Amino acid sequence: MIVKVLFMAFVSFLVYVSLVGSIGTDELIIGAIISIIIGVITRNLVVSDEKKVLSPRKWLGAFWYLAVYWIRYETTSHLDVVKRIFTMKYNPSIVRVPFNLTSEYGVTAVGNSITNTPGTVVVDIDEKRGYYYVHWIDAPSVEEEYCYKAISKGFEELVRRFL
């Protein structure tokens, strides 16, 4: 149980420090107190298996995911959207994108990654059938296999590293 609390407190503290914009003593103390409270409250909501939290392999997978996401996907998507703003070339569509994940965490992580990437927004999820419905700013094709490869396959591969 203590591992879950410490993990959630650590993650909460990192988010707090990144959002507060200052690293003064007061902010660090308040952040630590708030983070411990959040860790106690959310320990069973987010962490289901303490062994995974302690696994260096899972941590490396999570860091790899963040690095690839921010450097590759965010950068290329932002540049693509900027190009479309200047050229006014759009082909928007809502496409059905299959997913091959069974974990709620995985489905949520990939859905959030799709939504946070410029040019795509998950508008609905059909968990029973295994589909995201995604508004895509430029859909060259609406074929499911094409959409899967272009939108969610890379995220799924990255998410599997830390689930």
Image (cartoon, rainbow, N blue to C red):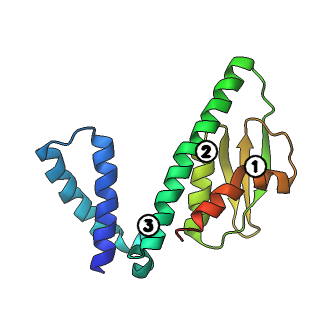
Q: Residues under labels 2 and 1: Cα distance?
A: 11 Å
Residue 125: give x, y in percent of width and height: 68, 58
Residue type beneath disc 1? Ala
Callout 3 crowding tier (Cα within 10 Å): few <14, some 14–19, many ≥20: some
Q: In the image, is 35 to the left or to the right of 119?
A: left
Q: Secondary structure at mark 3?
A: helix
Residue lying at 73% horizontally and 41% vertically, measured from the top left: 136
Q: Nearer the viewer, residue 92 or 70?
A: 70
Which of the 4 image quadrants contains residue 26?
top left
Q: Is residue 96 visible?
A: no
Say the numbered circle drawn on residue 59: 3
| Residue ID for mark 1 | 150
Which of the 4 image quadrants contains residue 159?
bottom right
Residue lying at 58% horizontally and 51% vertically, measured from the top left: 113
Residue 46: give x, y in percent of width and height: 43, 69
Q: Is residue 106 above or below residue 97?
A: below
Residue type beneath disc 2? Tyr
Tag count: 3
Which of the 4 image quadrants contains residue 24?
top left
Q: Residues under labels 3 and 1: Cα distance?
A: 26 Å
Q: Secondary structure at mark 2?
A: helix
Callout 1 crowding tier (Cα within 10 Å): few <14, some 14–19, many ≥20: some
N-terminal-most mark, 2 or 1: 2
Residue lying at 66% horizontally and 49% vertically, measured from the top left: 122
